[in-house]
Amino acid sequence: MAIAEAEVAHRAASDAELIAWVDEQDRVLGALPRAELRSRGLIGRGTFILLFNSAGELCVHRRTLSKAVYPGYWDVAAGGMVAAGEGYLASAERELAEELGIDDALLRDEGRFFFEQPDNRLWCAVFSAVSDAPLVLQPEEVLEARFVTVQAALLDTHNTPYCPDSLQALQHYLAKR
């Protein structure tokens, strides 16, 4: 299967995947396909993992063009939607392993925040991790990745499109420092 066909198949599967549906207080109401959550303006759960190397640089990556939300944007966090019946930590561990191939890093819970845009309403859990393991990028999700200083990433947001939800996750993290 060609890469473009694989991305379309991956997107269709992820749109049908059941996602935790929550209310404004992050209480679980049920499970719905992610496309339905977005189209109805309902709230899901998401995880954001800020991956640092031992030099303190942050991993930034560019999303594939097939992504339903923020296609081709740069992202300061690995992560994704929390599946039905899945906890925030389990989701973060799964997403970090899937997207960047990091499966042995200790995840530190950095707290929660609510993110809201018309097509993206989320209760977000922020985690941080440190790893120098080689990145193994998931081709359906990530086009490229690199480590940069946090300051360089923040400066780059003035010239390059970055995912606003993960930028809020980074701001949440930095506010605790």
Image: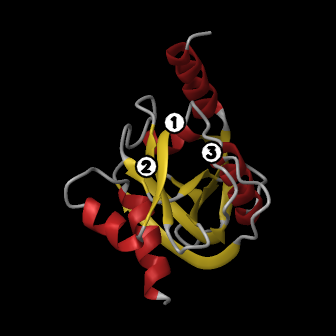
Can residue 40 be seen at all in this image of the molecule?
no
Label disc, if present, on residue 99 of the rendered structure: 3
Mark closest to the chain's N terminus, 1 or 2: 1
Mark closest to the chain's N terminus, 1 or 3: 1
Q: Is residue 159 above or below residue 26?
A: above
Residue kind at label 3, given as amino acid type = Glu
Can residue 113 be seen at all in this image of the molecule?
yes
Give the image quarter of residue 48: bottom right
The residue tagged 2 is 41
Q: Which residue is painted at 57% across and 24% down in the image?
A: 12
Q: Is residue 63 above or below residue 124?
A: above
Mark closest to the chain's N terminus, 3 or 2: 2
Residue kind at label 1, given as amino acid type = Ala
The residue tagged 1 is 35
Q: Position of residue 116 (x, y in %)?
A: 39, 61
Marks 1 and 2, Cα distance to the nearest angstrom?
10 Å
Left or right placement of residue 87 versus residue 99 in this view? right
Q: Is residue 68 above or below residue 168?
A: above
Look at discs 1 and 2 and give the one toward the viewer: 1
Q: Position of residue 66 (x, y in %)?
A: 45, 28
